[in-house]
Image (cartoon, helix red, strand yellow):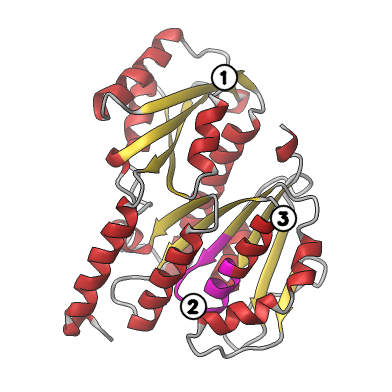
Amino acid sequence: MEKCSKIMLMGLGDFGSKVVKLVNLDQASFPKFFINSRDEYTNFNFNCKNSLTIDQSNFKYNWQKASKALSDKSLEIKSILVNVRILFLVVGLGGATGSGAALTVAKIAKDMGIIVIILATNPLKGESKFRQQTSFDVLLELKKIVDSLIIISNEQISQYYSDFFLENVIRLITANIQTKIGIIIKALCQKNALVNVNNSIVESILTNNNFVFVASAIAAGNKRAVFATENAIKSHFIEFDLFSSEEMLITITANNSILQSEISDILGTIRKNFNSDLKFSYGVYHNPKLEDQIEIGIIANQKKHSYEREKATKFNLVFDNKFNIF
């Protein structure tokens, strides 16, 4: 597909820059770029060839101020995005720089006809009301602009990996983001496809202002297809009601030893766990590196407006309880 000829991965703010720096993709096909502010909180090493620095700093929780500072560099951003067809933005929401940059860059990219997919982490429930408010406000604005929003839940990560050191948590998030990007690229570009997914469902899920679920799992053994599918469904990373999905893509990747009966097992597992009116399509891909393993990827969207209602309810509950505000 022509739109897959140039894909860019961009890290926004301190957290997004750190994650993108660690992501290991083919740089010839997927160049990286970084946008950050020059302040005392940033320990990222800048390279003028692949980064844009906001000279202004200390936005004091004001993401609108950061967004305006980036808007003043819109011509530079446009020159960076020339010929880009798909833009992955990685950001930790809650801070001013990354949150403001996400909105500005997304607007510019969409005006240029670029597919914009955001992978964002949200603040922990115990963090300050300013970070919670920023995340909530920016998400509502981004939902109006971008093609896909993938929200990685810091709260779930904290619950399930509470005994991890912070640096290991960052590596965990990075590996998860890298996997999600790989699954999306596989569905969009159809490289090494033995069976193609339905392009109309790909477009509907990924380019329609949806909150999106992306997860994968790998398994081996006699029931590898069922185990991998069930484990992909049980992902603990994304804040998302998977079972309210309307549409789903399934990527099935293995070496040449994949059996037709395993395809049937995968589809049967999906049908068993979801409503009969779920629209889904699957693609089969070849990867000899998997040897005797099978990898199942799932991409799904959520029913219109259900995420906003759910988030608004949670947000109001937190802010109605004064004891939860720091």
Viewer can see residue 42: no
Looking at the image, is 14 positioned above or below residue 29?
Answer: below
Instruction: Provide the secondary structure element on which disc 1 rests.
Output: loop
Report the residue at 57% width, 67% height from top.
102
Q: CA distance from mark 1 to mark 3?
A: 39 Å
Instruction: Provide the secondary structure element on which disc 3 rests.
Output: loop
| Residue 245 image-quadrant placement | top left
| Residue 81 image-quadrant placement | bottom right
**Residue bounds of the magenta highlight:** 90-103
Q: CA distance from mark 2 to mark 3?
A: 26 Å
On the picture, is 161 further left or further right than 147? left
- For residue 95, the mark is 2
- Amino acid carrying label 1: it is Asn
- For residue 255, the mark is 1
> How many C-alpha atoms fall within 10 Å of the one at disc 3: few (<14), some, or many (≥20)?
some
> In the rendered structure, which disc, 2 or 1, sits on the residue that comes first in sequence?
2
Q: Which residue is mark 3?
A: 112
Looking at the image, is 296 positioned above or below residue 88?
Answer: above
Report the front residue among 241 and 104.
104
